[in-house]
Image (cartoon, rainbow, N blue to C red):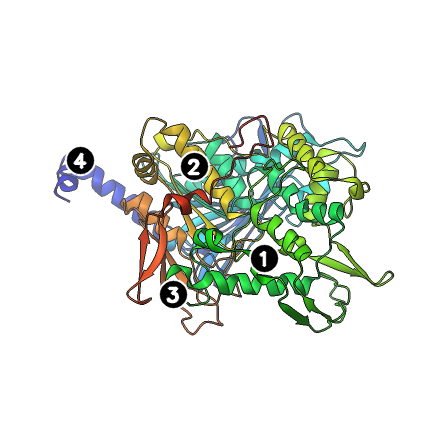
């Protein structure tokens, strides 16, 4: 504080008064005054990006007052929020395209010199208006983009092929990294102009998103180190070819071996695994916190001959999620069921046993192995996961097939490996998103909070561990393991969220806490220098008696353990044996997989 005051004494009084007066003037403007078409038009970032032209006629502006935002896993409930809702389109000189961007700018009285970029999920580059509120409630303007795909409801798989059936590389690169970068640059400049920020005023820029949005976050950190001061990246769907095609792995094995477990058998097995893993962290509370220890102790063969039974379910006529009728199921867990469950737990391998990709953690379930019932034959068969189908057929083979793989019955585990390798090579420069040297971002002063649910059944948790360890080994090769962890943790921290599913709390693990306040934690780190040793979290499942209670998530590689008869949670450095369960030798490929 004394040093700060000494610096202030060196600034002329007139300058301090002028700066304070300008700040007060900016914040005293009413939302109604600035949220007009004419005012926003004057603030448009027309020269922010060379070769980008803003379509003035596309501008829409309207003020929103006293809005309420509730029920999000990524920010607390917020009420009476007022903001300026702005959209406009831009194009690139010499290209017949149109990209639509959408920004919310908080009322001037609530603006805190912050900007937030948001991302998407699945094959969507945007989460539309579900993530933007997480910015304005903390005094940040916030933005999203349609990627140039035609609307905020369009997904990249709908536009990845041209009319002649060939790949639309402009849309691939927009999805890969370009559109998020342009949205950020335009949004930062719009924010500065809208709030009359001087060149001397600092605009703190941030990012927050999960899943595909997590991959998009890494695409920017790896390429545009000056864009953000802090990035909050959840369960990133990076290592894109591996990630999308591993969703087909269980179905490949089922088809190749002609083994089709009934869903009830896998669901029962998943429950038994959760119950087995639960107490291994020192407390029986319905939460899997030490899946690493569980991997060392778990033997799925112990559940062979366990009885299962599930009632029939009628067909769903929901137009957004139609589901066929499922007959009643009963029986005992068989060795065939265990073969498929072990495959998902330990990850795909080639026919000769080489490791293709990482597996899921115990507690994540066996969702990709689910089968479907064929009424016509009375048999169960594989169910192809749509993410994998779309990537294999549209992105790699450039075939306009969206719901099936015509030759899938001929695939072997080696075919899957070959497809992953082909996709990796084809999209290494756009979608793979695994560049491990983050030196430029670090030198620019950037901070990263990277989190991943330990029971994620969509993006394997070990995939995030692999990337963190890749960054550590590339950037600090001459340091010991613990010293390199300390060096990396000073600006990039990874948190494995015990008991969490994919980008959300796990409804089957009621008492687990989820990190809902990552943005204010990042703000404190960037703007106040408060380093998050553990990550703040909240119990969000209403099925818990502890709903609303606080929890703390350990920073990798520390792992949680309960002591004092389950009354105190601490973060310990795990045994080497436990640590090694997270590491995979992906020796199915001739190149190293970062």
Relative depth, front residue between 479 and 543: 479
- Mark 4 neighbour density, 10 Å: few (under 14) some (14–19) many (20 or more): few
Q: CA distance from mark 3 to mark 4?
A: 57 Å
Q: CA distance from mark 2 to mark 3?
A: 29 Å
Q: CA distance from mark 2 to mark 1?
A: 32 Å
Horizontal and vertical percent position of residue 1: 15, 45
**Nearer the observer, disc 2 or disc 3?**
3
> Helix, strand, or loop for circle 3?
loop
Q: CA distance from mark 4 to mark 1?
A: 73 Å
**Nearer the observer, disc 3 or disc 1?**
1
- Mark 3 neighbour density, 10 Å: few (under 14) some (14–19) many (20 or more): many
Q: Is residue 190 visible?
A: no
Report the residue marked by disc 2.
469
Q: CA distance from mark 2 to mark 4?
A: 45 Å
- Mark 2 neighbour density, 10 Å: few (under 14) some (14–19) many (20 or more): many
Disc on res. 301:
1
Horizontal and vertical percent position of residue 441: 40, 32
Q: Is residue 310 visible?
A: yes
Disc on res. 283:
3
Label 4 vs 1, first from the N-terminus: 4
Disc on res. 11:
4
Label 2 vs 3, first from the N-terminus: 3
């Amino acid at each position: 504080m004394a040093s700060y005051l000494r610096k202030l004494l060196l600034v002329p009084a007139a300058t301090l008064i002028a700066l304070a007066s300008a700040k007060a003037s900016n914040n005293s403007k009413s939302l109604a005054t600035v949220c007009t078409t004419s005012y926003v038009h004057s603030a448009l970032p027309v020269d922010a990006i060379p070769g980008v032209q803003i379509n003035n006629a596309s501008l829409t502006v309207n003020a929103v007052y006293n809005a309420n935002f509730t029920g999000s896993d990524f920010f607390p409930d917020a009420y009476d929020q007022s903001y300026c809702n702005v959209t406009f389109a831009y194009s690139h000189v010499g290209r017949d395209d149109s990209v639509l961007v959408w920004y919310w700018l908080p009322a001037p009285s609530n603006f805190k010199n912050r900007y937030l970029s948001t991302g998407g999920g699945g094959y969507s580059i945007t989460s539309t208006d579900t993530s933007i509120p997480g910015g304005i409630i903390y005094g940040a303007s916030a933005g999203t983009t349609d990627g140039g795909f035609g609307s905020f409801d369009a997904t990249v798989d709908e536009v990845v092929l041209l009319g002649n059936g060939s790949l639309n590389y402009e849309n691939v690169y927009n999805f890969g990294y370009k559109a998020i970068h342009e949205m950020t640059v335009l949004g930062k400049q719009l924010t500065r102009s809208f709030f009359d920020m001087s060149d001397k005023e600092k605009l703190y820029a941030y990012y927050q998103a999960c899943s595909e949005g997590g991959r998009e976050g890494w695409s920017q950190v790896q390429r545009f180190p000056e864009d953000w001061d802090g990035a909050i990246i959840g369960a990133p769907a990076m290592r894109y070819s591996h990630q999308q095609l591993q969703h087909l792995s269980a179905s490949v094995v089922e088809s190749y071996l002609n083994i089709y477990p009934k869903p009830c058998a896998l669901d029962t097995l998943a429950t038994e695994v959760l119950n087995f893993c639960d107490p291994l962290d020192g407390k029986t509370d319905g939460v899997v916190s030490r899946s690493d220890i569980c991997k060392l102790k778990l033997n799925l063969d112990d559940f062979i001959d366990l009885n299962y039974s599930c009632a029939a379910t009628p067909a769903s006529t929901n137009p957004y999620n139609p589901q066929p009728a499922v007959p009643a199921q009963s029986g005992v867990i068989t060795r065939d069921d265990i073969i498929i469950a072990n495959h998902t737990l330990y990850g795909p391998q080639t026919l000769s046993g080489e490791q293709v990709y990482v597996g899921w953690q115990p507690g994540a379930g066996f969702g990709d192995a689910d089968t479907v019932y064929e009424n016509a034959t009375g048999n169960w068969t594989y169910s192809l996961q749509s993410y994998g189908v779309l990537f294999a057929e549209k992105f790699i083979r450039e075939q306009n097939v969206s719901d099936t793989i015509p030759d899938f019955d001929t695939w072997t585990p080696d075919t899957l490996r070959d497809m992953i390798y082909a996709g990796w090579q084809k999209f290494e420069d756009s979608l793979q998103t695994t560049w491990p040297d983050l030196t430029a971002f670090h030198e620019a002063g950037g901070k990263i909070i990277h989190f991943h649910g330990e029971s994620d059944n969509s993006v394997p948790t070990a995939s995030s561990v692999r990337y963190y360890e890749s960054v550590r080994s590339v950037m600090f090769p001459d340091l010991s393991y613990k010293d390199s962890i300390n060096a990396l943790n000073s600006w990039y921290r990874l948190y494995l969220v015990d008991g969490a599913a994919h980008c959300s709390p796990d409804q089957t693990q009621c008492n687990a806490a989820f990190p809902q306040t990552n943005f204010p934690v990042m703000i404190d780190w960037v703007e106040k220098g408060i380093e998050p040793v553990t990550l703040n979290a909240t119990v969000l499942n209403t099925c818990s008696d502890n709903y609303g209670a606080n929890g703390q998530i350990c920073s990798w590689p520390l792992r949680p353990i309960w002591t004092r008869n389950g009354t105190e949670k601490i973060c310990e450095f795990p045994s080497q044996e436990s640590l090694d369960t997270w590491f995979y030798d992906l020796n199915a490929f001739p190149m190293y997989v970062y």
